Image (spheres, rainbow, N blue to C red):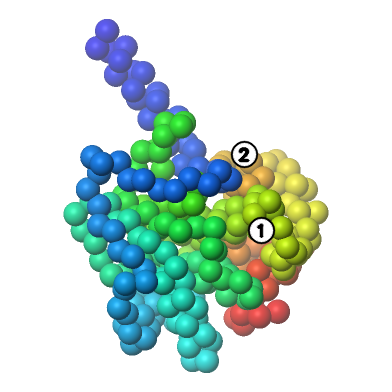
Amino acid sequence: MGTFLAILCFALVIVLIQNPHNQKETEQNNYTPDSQIKYHLYKGKEFSFNKEELHFVCTKYNPYYAALKQTNQDFFLNRLEDFIKQKDYYIVGGDAYREMPILISAAAIQISFGLREYLCPYFSNIIIHPQEYIGYDPLRILIGNVQGDSITLSWKHFFEDYQKADGKNVGLHEMAHALQVQYLFNTHRYNRRNEFRTDFEFYDKIDDDVLHSEKLKTDSLFDSNALSDPNEFWATSVELFFERPQELSIRHPRLYKSIVLVLNQDPSEGGLFK
Ligand SMILES: [Zn+2]
């Protein structure tokens, strides 16, 4: 019996690890932390960051920000301050660092830097776990997910992914899902026309063909999670767009150009705006 349970647990863990990202959900669901979980709550509007501190942290740990011209860095920091003020940060576990809200919010500013709207108002909460965490319904192990009005990330994975440009970036991945939820899946709440929603049609005409062609390759840029679902394919395309832009633009120029249109920025050019 003990052996059987051990095998069952092992099989369950394998299944959970194979699908690390949760897909978007569109239900509004205010975050109520489990009373058993120890966490720090930082309300963004009560944070006191000065521009020098934001600049220091972003320069040190966010290569995208570090490469911006100074005028764009000023613009970035203004947006970052506004974004932080709008969110509540639940930091799970004993260690809470000021870099956590700054850098996770900076990922949201990075992906939306070419767009007029950058506050993602649908999402009120950012939940930060020290490492992998358990997601429920269905039960699985996660490193990031978007659910209800919360964006949740494993700090360990978020931080490590920003330190190397290998095409993996869970922060950008979850922010890409957040944009879908905000502008594509909540048309009943945000029903006016929006540049992201309008330009997403360019991407939407191309992604199916690329996804199917990548499924046939042995050296795909995309992992099995990305190839399993169109929403995962979008979020992974965004990771590659920022982390391996030359490779993505050479292998899939039409897909790459469609993301340039959707996000209104072009990392492969070294410049940010089309
Ligand atoms: Zn995902």
Q: CA distance from mark 2 to mark 1?
A: 28 Å
Task: From the viewer's perspective, tell me whether residue 260 is left or right of residue 159.
Answer: right
* Residue sitting at x 35%, y 25%: 10
User: Label 1 amino acid?
Assistant: Tyr
Residue 180 seen: no
* Residue sitting at x 41%, y 34%: 136
Provide residue 34's location: percent of width, then percent of height: 30, 41
Label drawn at residue 190 = 1
Residue 36 seen: yes
Position of 252 relative to 80 (above/below) = above
Position of 106 relative to 18 (above/below) = below
Position of 217 relative to 252 (above/below) = above
Task: From the viewer's perspective, tell me whether residue 177 is left or right of residue 84.
Answer: right
Which residue is outermost to the left?
Answer: 94
The quadrant in which residue 151 appears is bottom left
- Counting residues from the start of the chain, the first of labels 2 and 1 encountered is 1
Label drawn at residue 175 = none
* Residue sitting at x 32%, y 45%: 33
Element at label 2: loop
* Residue sitting at x 61%, y 71%: 117
Provide residue 224's location: percent of width, then percent of height: 57, 41
Q: Nearer the viewer, residue 251 or 203?
A: 203
In which quadrant is the N terminus drawn?
Answer: top left
Task: From the viewer's perspective, tell me whether residue 181 is left or right of residue 149.
Answer: right
Residue tagged by mark 2?
Answer: 228
In which quadrant is the C terminus drawn?
Answer: bottom right
The quadrant in which residue 88 appears is bottom left
